[in-house]
Image: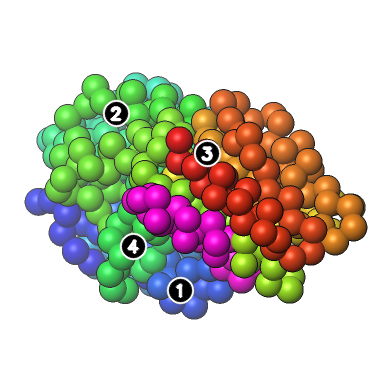
Amino acid sequence: MSTITKDIRYIGVNDHEIDLFEGMYIVPEGMAYNSYVILDEKTAVMDTADRHFVGEWLGNLKAALEGRKPDYLVVHHMEPDHSSGIEAFAEEYPEAKIVATAKAFTMMKNFTGKDFAERAVVAKEGDRLELGSHTLTFITAPMVHWPEVMMTYDSTDKVLFSADAFGKFGALDAEDEEGWACEARRYYFGIVGKYGAQVQAVLKKAAALDIQIICPLHGPVLNEDLPYYLDLYNTWSAYGVETEGVAVFYTSVYGHTKQAVELLVKQLEEKGCPKVAVTDLARDDMAEAVEDAFRYGRVILATTTYNAEVFPFMREFIEHLTERNFKGRKIGLIENGSWAPTAAKVMKGMLEGCKDLTFTETTVKILSAVSAENEKEIAQLADEILA
Ligand code: FEO
């Protein structure tokens, strides 16, 4: 338990047992499920925890309450990594009210079989809850990350309880040598990348508030340099370019496509490209690849033809991009095929529905191994992607 402000305590838990977060994302540094308590004339608990940690979380809550009883449980998000303690809380504290959006109560019924009707406080956009000296205002945030999500603004301590927004991978007791943005970006694009428009809508509402502290459901409490975090969220949700450079994504079966990539990287570096980020889609973390595609404005896709189609890891990667509304990038393609190359055509076709993509004029077509002609094309591609 730690103190966030005079009246707000942290009561979340760290998870170092998890193998895949949300069944998909590796989290080598674990995960934190954050929860908070506001201690005022009335007490409000903000969210619960993952099912494996409900006992630990209830213990943290009890310690923070120091013998008091909670008056409210505010449920910002019904995904089970935060909502699994609702039933246990309701049993332990039968007099406490539960505050959530109408959609969240529907989900509560679906998850637990109970709608808690006798103690439900249905929150709508702009509704207020007075705790004494603290006034909470509820801000709906649909699709950040599920439709029932809301955030809470405490105008007394100027705290935004931001639900999944501003979260990151990693337990809070793990070292974070790479800095917040690295795992926050992978988290953002993996989990809410599709919903940039909805994140933008919430950021607009947040811009009208005086926010000094952000308390997310994952990752550290943010209490300094807030413009840095807000600016990054604005860039990410607007599908803007965060970092100048070129992101290169490839697959290679016998090393020839990889050789073309290496030649291209050398060309890009010689031509002064500030950063070249290379990903082997068969071996590197797919979620890291996805965040890099959204981080840089210039993207190279290099892959082999496979079953008259495109190599499976490249197909999966492009699907991750298109389902997250990938847009506004410059793309260059390298294909390889020993008898009938189709990869470039297939990749272009897969990206057809994306808005504001431009393609380089040159597409490198390798027929098995990199030829002298390919080397010239690669130099040309480097010029065009940087132009
Ligand atoms: Fe952290 Fe969308 O749950």
- Residue type at tag 2: Ala
Q: Earlier in the sequence, mark 2 or mark 3?
A: 2
- Disc 2 to disc 3, how far (Cα)? 40 Å
Residue 89, relative to residue 191: is it above or below?
below
Task: Label 4: state its secondary structure.
Answer: loop
Q: Tell me the quarter of the image containing the C terminus.
A: top left
Question: Within 10 Å of the Cα at label 4, are there few (<14), some (14-19), or many (20+) other Cα atoms?
Answer: many
The residue at which mark 4 appears reads as: 12
Q: Pinpoint residue 30: horizontal percent, then vertical percent.
A: 43, 71
Which is more toward the observer, 295 or 117?
295
Q: Tell me the quarter of the image containing the N terminus.
A: bottom left
Magenta span covers which residues? 261-285
- Disc 3 to disc 1, how far (Cα)? 38 Å
Q: Quadrant of residue 264?
A: bottom right
Relative to 38, 358 lies left or right: right
- Disc 2 to disc 4, how far (Cα)? 24 Å
Task: Label 2: state its secondary structure.
Answer: helix
**Which mark, residue 206?**
2
Residue 276 within the magenta-colored segment of the rendering: yes
Q: Earlier in the sequence, mark 2 or mark 4?
A: 4
Task: Label 3: state its secondary structure.
Answer: helix
The residue at which mark 3 appears reads as: 384
Residues at circles 4 and 1 in contact by the CB criterion of under 8 Å: no
Residues at circles 4 and 3 in contact by the CB criterion of under 8 Å: no
